[in-house]
Amino acid sequence: MRHTVGRCVTVRGRGIHSGTDVTVRLLPADRPGITFVRSDLPGNPRIPAITSNLASSSRCTRLEKGDGAVMTPEHLLAACWGTGITDLVVELDSEELPIGDGSAEIWCEAFFLAGTQETPGASVALGPLPPIHVAHAGACITLTPSKTWRVEYSGRFFDGPEQHVEWTEETDFRQHVARARTFCTLSDALKLRKLGMIKGGTLENALLWVDDVSLLSDPALPPWVEDQPRPEKGLVRGQTLRYFDEFSRHKLLDLLGDLRLAGDLSPCAIHARCSGHELNHELLREIEKHTHSQKELER
């Protein structure tokens, strides 16, 4: 059974990388899949949320088709998965989706306000995938066919203990996954700012971990960090975790969002260790190879 939103809902905010204000309209879909529409560009180009439209990027997910592109759709796509939205039109008037508070809560709230309705046609998942394993620089993701969905993430962050979280079809996504926020070390934040990224980043939409106190004297330090009391290593003062394992929960959120690009798959068990968007995308491309082969055999 497929579902879309029950009515149009508007979400406004700012992109974390571009720093640009954006208005998004979530519209009921009359066809399968999730499609982004750039209302600010000539011809209103449509960018389907599918693996073949993935563009090269390591810090976030980026989709491109023709003259249209969309940045950071992963939190919205994760909320679609977690709330059962299979079909959706996402109309936006800028390139990057709003970051909200750094989690997927902004989208879960929008879907709650919109309600849901069934869309025509039954879900037709492809046959089970073979086992797939991708790895790079100590990070890895393993996928195996399963009777039910289970997605796990394991990792160690900032010299802390190992964290392990999982999502299954019985998990309350909004309670246990959606509210986990994006995070960054101070050293990475400075590098990204020098590259012209995270222009819209603040302490209200990302967790900031001070990994090197000496960097607090860097001239490129953003004003919203300069104004904070000088912390020791750890989260900037005033920030607290929503979950003791919030970092791994956010990585799980990103993984679920990226997996939505694979479309309607048969249930899988997926275990990711220390992975990020780059390896998630590699997994998606491996899945695409196998699903393309299946479709060729079915013709």
Image (tube, rainbow, N blue to C red):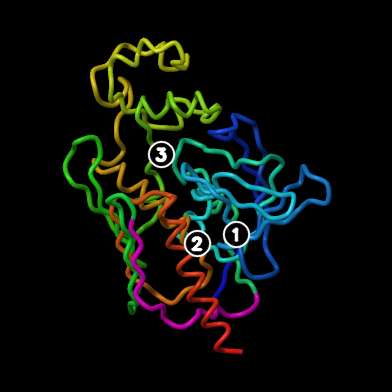
46 relative position to 54: left or right: right
Kindly identify the amino acid type of the residue bearing the numbered disc 1.
Answer: Ala
Q: Residue furthest front?
A: 137
Q: Earlier in the sequence, mark 3 or mark 1?
A: 1
Compared to 199, does 109 lie above or below? below
Disc 2 target residue: 260
Q: Quadrant of residue 135?
A: bottom left
Asked if the residues shown at circle 1 and circle 2 are in contact, with their CB atoms under 8 angstroms apart, the answer is: yes
**What stretch of residues is rendered in magenta?**
120-135
Q: Amino acid at mark 2?
A: Arg
Give the labeled residue for mark 1: 49
Mark 3, residues whose alpha carbon is within 10 Å: few (<14), some, or many (≥20)? many
- Quadrant holding the C terminus: bottom right
Considering depth in this image, is 148 or 56 the residue closer to the camera? 56
- What separation in Å lies between label 3 and label 1 (alpha carbons)? 21 Å
Mark 1 element type = loop
